[in-house]
Image: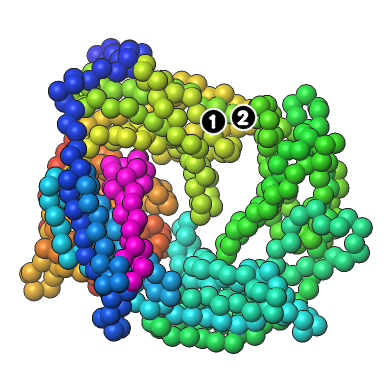
């Protein structure tokens, strides 16, 4: 019986998708959202603040399919009209203030979505923006001369990829006087880092090999010895002065050829570096002879990538460890891009309930460190539900489906009948992977309930966190993990979690990144409530707020 069902599922994917036309229901664009923006400290209206609106779609779809932005008028007022019915996020920003989503209760936390029905006008969606903090200073070299073009970043220590790391919150480059000014900082504790970046062809004949390592204030490369600053709303910490100590930079020389051994003339070469504190990349053209030279490269781990600008679309990547000595004879051999091809599959019993729709698919890299997700441009799925993708990089990739109807989600991702939903698709250079199946389902799980405070009333300001019992799944962007703010009446609802065993807990506060920090999850697990979900199950839960110590 199981084998027959699997065969039926695959056969459906080979047929053109034809859902019943009467299932389609156009969303009338008649809703309105409006409000005012004021300064939190004075209550005065803020003019020319930007309000950005994005519509929230089901999991595995981008949030920017419907996106708009407006500026507030002299009275701080804004308005969005002719909106399709749906759920929306609003984000407000203004130079000198701390940008924030609507409904945010604490700095760094998420906001609250707004549900707009067809024809509904939602008034008084108001923001009170907090003035941002400012850090200013100057960067000098070992001779006391100002250093221009230095990337200065303010960093916060927060969980990332399962461990606490210094993450850049805002950056600015020094001017010709070595000065920097970073503004709009949210209240909190920060470190200041100066990074010298001079990748490029440079002057191969120059004897100057001076470089500078990334340096934390007051002048150390050791994060444990760096000074930490506490900044409040609207506070200025000024005139920090830091001198950078020189180190020897090296030269990297090499050639880039295609799969037939011919020079990759005028291809684009990029060198990038991603550390626990920052990421950086720089590009240049390969010479007509396929040669390249990179000067002023400081010690560290880098990635080289070359890609043709012509119809050949060949690409090559390699890891490069740079020490104290020059590196010569680097050889990059390009090959045609790798591809992933497959089809969308839908259970015949569920297909009749799906509205008429057009799917697109995309891939994104899930290889750590996952600080930036590199995604491929969306590709439209053919009428027979087949697709072919060309990811921009090798390594592990996930597939997202765009334009999924409400209530539908990705059930599984398979390669030649092997489930890789959680692991992703491992893509090697010049590899063509076929037999990929992206199975969709409308049998979504749902959990809902209410969070109560210590007096038995609804908890209005708290976080609800769901994470799996299996700690191997405590990973960034895991589909088994969710965190959200409870509504004003303490109620919560989440749909689309995969069938599994889970913990759920309500917390009075949560720092950014803690929702996938294994150390934090291990600490709160004894106070969490366990539950299980099977496919299509709806479960109602009642929680009490826990204090985070």
Crowd band around label 1 with a 10 angstrom C-alpha radius: few (<14), some (14–19), many (20+): some
Question: Relative to 286, does residue 519 appear above or below in the rendering?
Answer: below
Q: Is residue 244 left or right of residue 17?
A: right
Residue occupying the far front of the picture: 74
Image position, residue 404 (x, y; %): 29, 34
Residue 411, x across and y down, in percent: 31, 33
Disc 1, SS = loop
| Residue displayed at 8% across by 69% down | 457
Residue at x-position 18% and y-position 21% = 21
Q: To which quarter of the image does residue 92 belong?
A: bottom left
Q: Which residue is mark 1?
A: 390
Identity of the residue drawn at 18% across and 19% down: 20
Q: What residue sits right under mark 2 in the picture?
A: 337
From the viewer's perspective, is 370 left or right of 146?
left
Q: Nearer the viewer, residue 432 or 284?
A: 284
Residue 371 point in image, percent of width and height: 51, 54
Quadrant in the picture for the N terminus: top left
* 193 vs 395: above or below: below
**Residue 68 forms part of the magenta stretch:** yes
Q: Are marks 1 and 2 in contact (CB under 8 Å)?
A: yes
The residue nearer to you, when weighing 97 against 534, is 97
Q: Which residues are magenta?
A: 47-72
Residue 308 makes an appearance in the image? yes
| Badge 1 or badge 2: first in the primary sequence | 2
């Amino acid at each position: 019986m199981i084998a027959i069902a699997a065969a039926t599922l695959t056969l459906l994917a080979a047929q053109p998708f034809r859902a019943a036309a009467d299932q389609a229901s156009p969303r009338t664009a008649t809703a309105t959202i409006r409000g005012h923006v004021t300064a939190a400290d004075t209550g005065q209206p803020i003019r020319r603040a930007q309000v950005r609106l994005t519509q929230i779609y089901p999991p595995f779809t981008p949030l920017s399919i419907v996106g708009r932005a407006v500026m507030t008028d002299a009275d701080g007022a804004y308005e969005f009209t002719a909106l399709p019915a749906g759920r929306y996020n609003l984000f407000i920003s203004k130079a000198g203030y701390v940008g924030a989503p609507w409904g945010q209760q604490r700095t760094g936390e998420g906001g609250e979505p707004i549900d707009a029905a067809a024809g509904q006008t939602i008034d008084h969606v108001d923001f009170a923006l907090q003035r941002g903090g400012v850090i200013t200073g100057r960067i000098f070299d070992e001779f006391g001369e100002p250093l221009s073009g230095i990337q200065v970043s303010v960093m916060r220590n927060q969980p990332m990829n399962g461990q606490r790391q210094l993450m850049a919150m805002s950056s600015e480059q020094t001017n010709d006087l070595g000065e920097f000014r970073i503004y709009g900082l949210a209240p909190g504790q920060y470190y200041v880092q100066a990074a010298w970046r001079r990748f490029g062809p440079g002057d191969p004949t120059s004897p100057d090999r001076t470089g500078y390592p990334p340096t934390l204030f007051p002048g150390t490369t050791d994060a444990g010895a760096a000074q930490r600053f506490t900044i409040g709303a609207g506070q200025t910490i000024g005139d920090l002065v830091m001198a950078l100590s020189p180190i020897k930079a090296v030269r990297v020389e090499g050639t880039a050829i295609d799969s037939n051994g011919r020079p990759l003339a005028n291809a684009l070469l990029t060198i990038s570096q991603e550390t626990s504190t920052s990421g950086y990349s720089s590009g240049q053209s390969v010479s007509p002879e396929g040669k390249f030279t990179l000067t002023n490269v400081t010690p560290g781990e880098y990635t080289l990538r070359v890609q043709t600008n012509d119809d050949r679309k060949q690409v090559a990547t390699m890891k490069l460890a740079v020490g104290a000595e020059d590196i010569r004879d680097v050889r990059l051999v390009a090959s045609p891009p790798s591809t992933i091809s497959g089809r969308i599959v839908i259970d015949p019993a569920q297909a009749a309930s799906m509205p008429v729709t057009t799917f697109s698919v995309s891939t994104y890299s899930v290889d750590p460190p996952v600080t930036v997700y590199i995604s491929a441009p969306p590709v439209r799925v053919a009428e027979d539900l087949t697709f072919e993708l060309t990811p921009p990089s090798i390594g592990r990739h996930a597939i997202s489906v765009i334009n999924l109807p409400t209530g539908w989600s990705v059930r599984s991702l398979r390669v030649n009948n092997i489930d890789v939903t959680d692991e992703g698709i491992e893509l090697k250079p010049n590899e063509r992977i076929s037999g990929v199946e992206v199975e969709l389902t409308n049998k979504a799980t749902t959990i809902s309930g209410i969070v109560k405070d210590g007096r038995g009333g609804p908890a209005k300001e708290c976080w609800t966190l769901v994470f799996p019992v299996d700690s191997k799944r405590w990973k960034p962007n895991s589909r088994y993990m969710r965190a959200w703010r409870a509504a004003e009446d303490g109620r919560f609802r989440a749909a689309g979690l995969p069938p599994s065993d889970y913990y759920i807990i309500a917390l009075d506060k949560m720092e950014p990144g803690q929702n996938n920090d294994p150390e934090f999850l291990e600490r709160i697990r004894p106070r969490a409530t366990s539950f299980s979900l099977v496919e299509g199950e709806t479960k109602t839960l009642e929680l009490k707020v826990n204090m985070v110590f």
